[in-house]
Amino acid sequence: RHFKKSHGRTLLQELVACRIQRAKRLLRETHVPIKYVAYAAGFSSMSNLCKVFRREVGMTPGEYRESKTRKG
């Protein structure tokens, strides 16, 4: 309760936000398969990453990677 009061979100929401940020960075800056991005970012599976990523970002990890690495 103290964390939510001082930060405006729960500890779990903060943890998910940190995991999503790490996944985004890995998707932008590496060519590591999404399965390994999921584990490196702290998700239990690729399907869990995909579900949470779509909910939080509005697109799949693959779509995000494509949109950020597209030239032109």
Image (cartoon, rainbow, N blue to C red):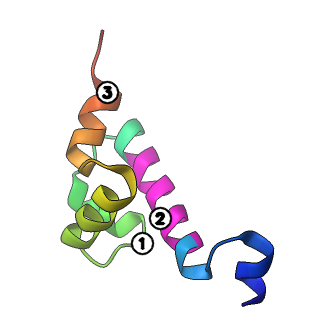
What residue appears at the point 24 percent right and 33 percent down from the top-left corner? 66
Residue drawn at the location 54% of the way across and 63% of the way down: 18
Indicate the quadrant containing the N terminus: top left, top right, bottom left or bottom right.
bottom right
Task: Characterize the local packing of mark 1: few (<14), some (14-19) or many (20 or more) Cα atoms within 10 angstroms.
Answer: some
Q: Is residue 24 visible?
A: yes
| Amino acid type shown at disc 1 | Gly
Task: Read off the residue under disc 3.
Answer: 69
Q: Main secondary structure of the magenta part?
A: helix
State how far apart marks 3 and 2 are (Cα): 20 Å
Q: Is residue 45 left or right of residue 22?
A: left
Residue 20, image x, y percentages: 44, 59
* Crowd band around label 3 with a 10 angstrom C-alpha radius: few (<14), some (14–19), many (20+): few
Q: Residues within 10 Å of mark 2 (few under 14, many from 20)?
A: many
Residue 42: mark in rendering: 1
The mark closer to the camera, 2 or 1, is 2
The stretch of residues the image draws in magenta is: 14-26
Between 66 and 7, the one nearer to me in the picture: 7
CA separation in Å, label 2 and label 1: 6 Å
Look at the numbered discs 2 and 1 and tell me whether their residues touch, using CB distance below 8 Å: yes
Of the two numbered discs 3 and 2 on the same chain, state the one appearing first in sequence. 2
Percent coordinates x, y for residue 59 in the rendering: 26, 47
3D distance between C-alphas at marks 1 and 3 = 23 Å
Q: Quadrant of residue 48?
A: bottom left
Give residue 5's quadrant in the image: bottom right
Q: Secondary structure at mark 3?
A: helix
